[in-house]
Image (cartoon, rainbow, N blue to C red):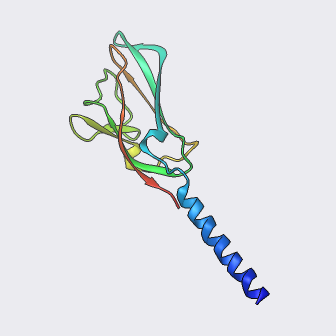
Amino acid sequence: MRGSSKIQDQILSEHLSEFNLGLAEPCSSSDIAVRQTRTGGTVEGKPEYEVLVTNTCECSQSRVLLRCYGLSSVEPVNRRAIRPVDEERCIVGGGRPITRGAPIRFKYAWMTPQDFPVISTQIHCQ
């Protein structure tokens, strides 16, 4: 009987470990950070900004949508990094997953810095 108790304890311990993993706080769209800085350059008299989109979560996040209202810029913006999907939203990195430590960067030039709030993401945890 003593041997079966050890097996039961081990099974219970494994299930509790799986349960505790489920209690860990999952990633959310708030783990996508959008930071921008002035590059110091100007394009057609407008200040240039560099935007860095990072994922601070262990899980990758794809289909990152930002509110961008058409992404106004007097210089061409790298469409592989960000592109409008409609009048209001832009998709980052073509929808590909953004992993921690692999940010997406792009530059634009406009009269004032634009806000790029995160609208939604698709989270991929394993």
Q: Considering only vertical position in the picture, is 9 above or below 88? A: below
Residue 85 lies in quadrant: top left
Q: Where is residue 75 in the image (x, y as percent from the top left)?
A: 34, 23
Looking at the image, the residue that sits furthest to the right is 2
Q: Nearer the viewer, residue 80 or 19?
A: 19
Toward which corner of the image does residue 114 lie, by quadrant? top left
Residue at the extreme bottom: 1
Foreground: 12 or 107? 12
Q: Where is residue 57 in the image (x, y as percent from the top left)?
A: 54, 45
Q: How many labels does the image show?
A: 0
For this orientation, the residue located farthest to the top is 45
Q: Nearer the viewer, residue 107 or 75?
A: 107
Q: Which residue is drawn at 20% across and 34% down?
A: 87
Which residue of the protein is positioned furthest toward the front in this rendering? Answer: 1
Q: Which residue is pictured at 53% across the width and 47% down the height? A: 99
Residue 62 percent coordinates (x, y)? 42, 50
**Which residue is located at x 41 percent, y 43 percent?**
93
What's the residue at 41%, 38% (across, down)?
A: 81
| Residue 7 percent across, percent down from the top left | 71, 82
Residue 47: image quadrant is: top left
Report whether 85 appears left or right of 23.
left
| Quadrant of the drawing holding the N terminus | bottom right
Is 17 placed left or right of 5 in the picture? left
User: Does residue 110 lie above or below 17 as drawn?
Assistant: above
